[in-house]
Amino acid sequence: MPFNRTRLSFAALTLALALTTVAVNGQSPPPPEVRGDVLTDVGPVPAPATCGCVTAPFTVMRIRPGWGYGHGPGAPETDAPPSRDERQRQRVFDAETLRDLPTNYDDALSGNPHASVSIGLELTNGTALKRDDVEAAKWFLLAAGQGHEIAYVQLGHRYHRGLGLEQNDSAAAYWFYQGAVRGDTIAMTALGGLYAAGRGVTQDWAAAARWWQKAKEWRFVGDTYACGLGADQDNERALRAYERGAESHDMSSAIQLGHMHAGGCAAKADPELAVKSYQKAADQGYPEAQVALSQLLLQGRGTESDPLRAFYWARMAELRLPSGALQSEAKARAAAAAKQLPAFLVTDTDGMVKDLIRASSEPMNK
């Protein structure tokens, strides 16, 4: 796509003149467009509902905790509102951004890709400048023409989502590819997802697997082996991939690793390792792990039977999950555990769980 310097210069001038009417609205949580878990999520990938022992294959899991919250079993995935001090710091930063904006424009239009990306991100953040996806896309297009890798990923994401640009998965695949061949792992992961889904490109599971391998996206690599999609079905290689992901603190991999051991899909299935894997993710607020851990605790698999802890984890998940199959499962397990406990313990533990959820829902900074 050719770049019209005159048109961009006019857009920059118009925007600069409008800045006097833009209120500096303080710091806000980062927009989805800068989150890795959002940028790599290119939509559902058609795959069997279950592949061996794992669940929800090729699904991007939202990172917990959300912006502004502390870690813990009740950690939300949503973002916290900014504190008063954070808003004040943002106002100072935004004032500096507005002051430097004319220079930034000149630099961008003179060929500086970092300046072009900076303006695009400011128009995305919506703090110093009012959010404007159409204008942001123009600056990212300019930055892409100037060779900036962040711009390739942003354009891939925006074409896929139809943000400021007409939705076009073929264009999304083109831009993710530009980032991928230059070594960007987010672009590699997203491109793999498009190949797996056949969205914007011809479906090619082998190509998807290759890009995920290059990105070291171990959760998806493990899923390819567990499902036999893009690679021969191989539970042991799936297990090793999930182990590498879990070692890198990817809770999605830790959960799949737990499923492999709990479901007996490993040659040396170890329920104790399943408990440890689920515990790792449960402690950081992932409901699926909390429900699975509750079941093992109730059954006494991989650990001593412990209906009290089983009730705690099942209730923690039940109260935080939206309506659906997983919440129903959590509710059933909490009820089963409660039957094995004295009424006063159920009441006390329920109150403790609710207190923890309330505490976890409080931003770290107010």
Image (tube, helix red, strand yellow):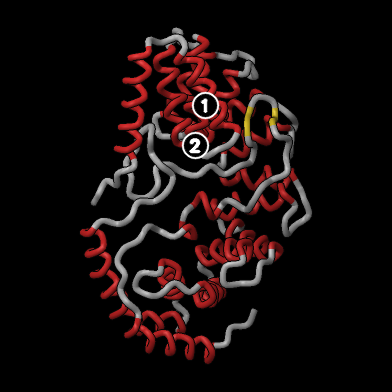
Q: Position of residue 245 (x, y in %)?
A: 52, 34
Circle 1 is placed at which residue position? Answer: 330
Q: Is residue 56 visible?
A: yes
Please state which amino acid type lies under the numbered disc 2.
Leu
**Amino acid on which disc 1 is placed:** Ala
Residue 44 in the image: x percent, y percent? 66, 47
Which mark, residue 321? Answer: 2
The image quadrant of residue 158 is bottom right
- Taking 207 as reference, is 327 left or right? left
- Locate residue 207, reporting x and y percent: 72, 47
Which residue is more in the foreground, 325 or 16? 325
In this picture, residue 206 sits left or right of residue 163: right
- Mark 2 closeness class: few <14, some 14–19, many ≥20 residues within 10 Å: some
**Where, by quadrant of the figure, is residue 355 drawn?**
top left
Q: Is residue 89 shown above or below 188?
A: below
Q: Position of residue 278 (x, y in %)?
A: 48, 25
Q: Which mark is residue 349?
A: none
